[in-house]
Amino acid sequence: MVLIDAAKGCATEPPNLDVYPADFVVCSFYKIFGYPTGLGALIVKNEAASLLNKTYFSGGTVAASIADIDFVQKRKSIEQVLEDGTISFLSIASLQHGFKIIEMLTTSAIALHTSSLATYVRKKMLYMKHRNKKNVCIIYGQEASKVADLKTSPTITFNLKREDGTWFGYREVEKLASLSGIHLRTGCFCNPGACAKYLGLSHSDLVSNFEAGHVCWDDNDVIKGKPTGAVRISFGYISTYQDAEEFLKFLQSSFVSKPIASSNGHTLSMNTLNLVDNQSQQVVPDVRLKSIIIYPVKSCQGFSVQSWPLAAGGLKYDREWLLQGSGGEILTQKKVPELASIRTLINLELGKLFVESPKRKDKLQISLLENLTHLTAEVDVYGQRYEVESYDENVNTWFSEAIGRHCTFMRCSSSKKSLCTSTGQNGRLCRDTRSKLSFVNEGQLLLISEESVSDLNSRLSSSNGNGKQHVLVDAMRFRPNIVISGSTPYREDNWKRLHIGDAYFTSMGGCNRCQMINLHQNAGQVIKSKEPLATLASYRREKGKILFGVLLNYEDGSSGEETVAERWLQVGQEVHTSTE
């Protein structure tokens, strides 16, 4: 018997069942009309209907049933038997409008329009070359010799290669496309057979990838030098030539290496971020500590201080508390923007954490020295286990009302992190060397340079000169722990160690930025834009990461048992750096 998966095909060139007499055909109304999601149809030949015998039943599919014995009589017609529960009748009612559009445009015109766009884009993609003449785009599923055929599918599945032959991960492509307002799909598209075939993944490769931790929907897009999925773009009747040009322009600007002429006429490659400092012995004069910021509660506002003590986990009390959702998830600004309005302050003399919210009239006071007697539990924070202590319901209610959803306030009591002493690339300690007593994601502290922020702002100003809204950012947009001044832009990329006063720090490398830096507050409202991440992506990308600022770990000098004298950071202290 024959089943045709026409979910996408029905949108542009529906199968002729006189020519292809299938027993079953599935189609997607979402892919035909673009609305509504989650609604499709199963078309069944009458003679084949009797084969669809479900072994279960639910509401609306039975004529009679008896609860305490095995007795059920199903309804007569096939659609009554297969449509479990309440069907999506409101969405179904909207289909008539979609069919009217298809009728007006005609399927043949849609097929010609979409295949023409796909053919044009495919041809342009095949012609894209890096400065060394290597191909940028690897297109799957259709030979280049068939490009001129107007029966071309309106979808293009592809991966992108760097100038050196390595792959751009599909997650990197998706991330940058999102910043450019381009919607595309990545991964294996629920088609593991085609995925393995075109990517050249053997059974052992697939099993090995799974054992390495790769599952559907994760970010492991390249493993052992091979892509684990691909990128797909689709054209529909509403797509335009301008959309196609915009996509090609996006590929050209984001992934094609291009030379620029230097002042002496020679060419320089601009395809990767240069993190190598050829003047490693050069002394940077008078770099100073400009600001110190503490964030007691993860993803809430921090506060600035003139001086602050250090502890084994970095800055004392930094990110020592967090909020957990009712489903066990860790709440962050990306999920709960209301966290950005919660203000925090620690008074060391009083030994208290003060928390304020515009949605609560009372200020919350929490003792830093309080010996919590509430339940101790373990939570998972981004793959790392922590022992935590919780607070009473009064505290949880306060935070729940402040952010408008039920949550639990927790304090880190210990971390089950294993310390790694091996060195990685550039001689830096591996990222598994993290704090001992705080909910940091990677390094214990984030350092931002004022000069790097100024350089970013100059680029934002030049890119906004064509009538776009003027966007400028300050160092606080990046949630730094320490801000320095007196350096040169991005010199911090090359530092391996630094000391401030009598405190020493190890650089863990650049901080990979995400959409969170695009969130900012305006008149109490959280505003989201595509900047500054889009501009950073244009010149601060390295192997799929958009880097800005560096992560530091504090070298407390302890071997685990002896007590080390408490050290303090002070605004105005000189910052001494080393690139070796």
Image: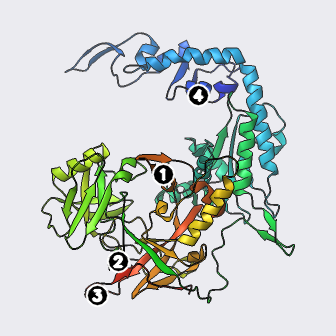
Q: x, y percentage for residue 323?
A: 30, 54
Indicate which label's residue lies in the foreground, 4 or 1. Answer: 1
Q: Which residue is mark 1?
A: 519
Q: Nearer the viewer, mark 1 or mark 3?
A: 1
Numbered disc 2: secondary structure: strand
Which amino acid is tagged 1?
Leu
Mark with earlier residue (2, 3): 2
Q: Indicate which label's residue lies in the foreground, 2 or 4.
A: 2
Label placed on residue 564: 3
Task: Give the residue pinned by disc 2.
Answer: 307
Q: Is residue 458 above or below residue 433?
A: above
Q: Secondary structure at mark 1?
A: strand
Residue at label 4?
A: 34
> Disc 4 to disc 1, how far (Cα)?
29 Å
Q: Is residue 293 above or below residue 365?
A: below
Mark 4 lies on a secondary structure that is loop
- In this orientation, which residue lies closer to the viewer: 11 or 399? 399
Q: Residues within 10 Å of mark 2 (few under 14, many from 20)?
A: few
Q: Could you tell me if residue 236 is visible in this image? A: yes
Which amino acid type is marked by label 3?
Val
- Marked residue nearer the N-terminal end (1 or 2): 2
| C-alpha gap between disc 1 and disc 3 | 39 Å
Q: Are marks 4 and 1 in contact (CB under 8 Å)?
A: no
Q: Which mark is residue 318?
A: none
| Quarter of the view holding residue 1 | top right
Q: Amino acid at mark 2?
A: Ser
Instruction: Kindly report the distance in space between the C-alpha atoms of the residues bearing marks 2 and 3.
Output: 19 Å
